[in-house]
Image (cartoon, rainbow, N blue to C red):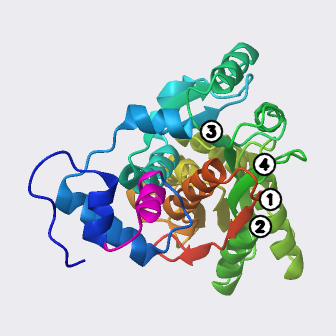
């Protein structure tokens, strides 16, 4: 980029194109959020926009593109749940949601796309949401829905709303999705515990109406069977800190001889650690722990938690990229992307 920016007057797309040394059509595609522009070309255009102080006329652009330059992050929760905490309160205290928002914002903010947060937890709110989306108030949806029976992914597909789902859908649905390989991550956890000499290994699961919790339990049993080991106990939790504490109390009553626990979320592990401490179980000398997520809760544990990392920020960013691509090019086929988890070893195992 070696051309001088215009010195006065209203800056146009042609001015930006001249400064960037690209075509007007390329500038238009970058400004309108196309995901098909070469990254080097995109940087040239973005630098030229900054150099010329170009400000897009969003009202005029909306008339041409019929887009709102906004997407919704929809969090869909089960109507009946075992958790006493209010849905909204849990959403803002669980590290999972903050990491998802961070990943989405990294993609949409440079493109001038706004994020609308919407919460859905019953039939009425689902109906209102689908009506809102049909009216074109946002261009598409990043959907966080973990329960297998949730009808919302199917409703969005029927309504032909551009959408990308976090996690594999619990029922056959024509929707793009991004997930981590839950089963493979749990196998990593069990392999680490077995390599450390643990043989009486138990697990605290997530809610078993959620595909992610089902896959983590399946991975646990698969890895245990591969080593000829029987599980030392299993208690269903709810992916919350309080739920992790309650589940660990039940697990100790059920399986006092355990020497390791795979806990299906870091937040549950954070609740489980004080229960083990009060029971006189040293971590990791008496009981080794491995969690899942690699969230801030893992660092808050004492000792810090060995855990399976699923790269939530990168996954959320990929969801946003797929959604923008779907909005720009609705005829493109739907996609699924699977990230591979890794094990982060710390002091608990």
Quickly name the residue at label 1: 215
Question: Of callouts 3 and 1, which one flags the residue occurring earlier in the amino acid sequence?
Answer: 1
Depth check, mark 3 against mark 1: the one in front is 1
Q: How far is mark 2 from mark 3, CA to CA?
A: 25 Å
* Label ID, residue 246: 3
Magenta highlight on residue 112: no
Q: Secondary structure at mark 4?
A: loop
Which residue is at the front of the view, 256 or 347?
347
Residue 154 appears at what percent x and percent y? 83, 36
> Dots 1 and 2: beta carbons under 8 Å?
yes
Question: Of callouts 3 and 4, which one flags the residue occurring earlier in the amino acid sequence?
Answer: 4
Residue 225 appears at what percent x and percent y? 89, 75
Q: Which span of residues is magenta-colored?
A: 21-32
Badge 2, how many Cα within 10 Å: few under 14, some, many 20+?
A: many
Looking at the rendering, in which quadrant would you find the N terminus?
bottom left
Looking at the rendering, in which quadrant would you find the C terminus?
bottom right
Residue 227 position (above or below residue 302) = below
Q: How far is mark 2 from mark 4, CA to CA?
A: 22 Å
């Amino acid at each position: 980029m070696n051309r001088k920016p215009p010195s006065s007057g209203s800056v146009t797309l042609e001015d930006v194109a001249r400064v960037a040394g690209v075509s007007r059509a390329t500038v238009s595609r970058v400004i309108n959020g196309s995901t098909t522009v070469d990254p080097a070309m995109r940087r040239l255009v973005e630098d030229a926009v900054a150099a010329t102080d170009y400000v897009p006329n969003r009202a005029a652009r909306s008339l041409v593109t019929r887009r709102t330059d906004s997407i919704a992050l929809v969090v869909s929760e089960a109507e009946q749940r075992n958790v006493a905490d209010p849905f909204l309160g849990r959403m803002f205290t669980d590290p999972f949601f903050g990491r998802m928002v961070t990943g989405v914002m990294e993609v949409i903010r440079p493109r001038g796309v706004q994020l609308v947060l919407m919460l859905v937890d019953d039939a009425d709110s689902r109906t209102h949401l689908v009506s809102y989306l049909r009216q074109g108030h946002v261009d598409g949806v990043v959907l966080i829905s973990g329960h297998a029976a949730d009808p919302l992914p199917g409703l969005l597909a029927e309504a032909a709303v551009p959408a990308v789902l976090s996690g594999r859908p619990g029922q056959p649905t024509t929707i793009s999705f991004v997930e981590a390989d839950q089963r493979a991550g749990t196998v990593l956890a069990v392999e680490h515990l077995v390599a450390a000499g643990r043989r009486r290994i138990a697990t605290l699961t997530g809610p078993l109406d959620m595909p992610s919790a089902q896959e983590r339990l399946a991975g646990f049993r698969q890895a245990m069977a591969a080593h000829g080991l029987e599980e030392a106990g299993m208690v269903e939790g709810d992916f919350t800190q309080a739920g992790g504490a309650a589940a660990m109390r039940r697990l100790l009553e059920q399986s006092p001889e355990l020497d390791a626990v795979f806990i299906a979320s870091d937040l549950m592990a954070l609740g489980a650690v004080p229960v083990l401490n009060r029971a006189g179980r040293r971590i990791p000398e008496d009981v080794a722990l491995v969690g899942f997520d690699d969230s801030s809760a893992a660092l808050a544990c004492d000792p810090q938690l060995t855990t399976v990392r699923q790269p939530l920020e990168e996954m959320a960013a990929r969801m946003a990229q797929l959604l923008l691509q779907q909005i720009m090019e609705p005829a493109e086929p739907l996609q699924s992307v699977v990230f591979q988890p890794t094990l982060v070893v710390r002091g608990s195992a």
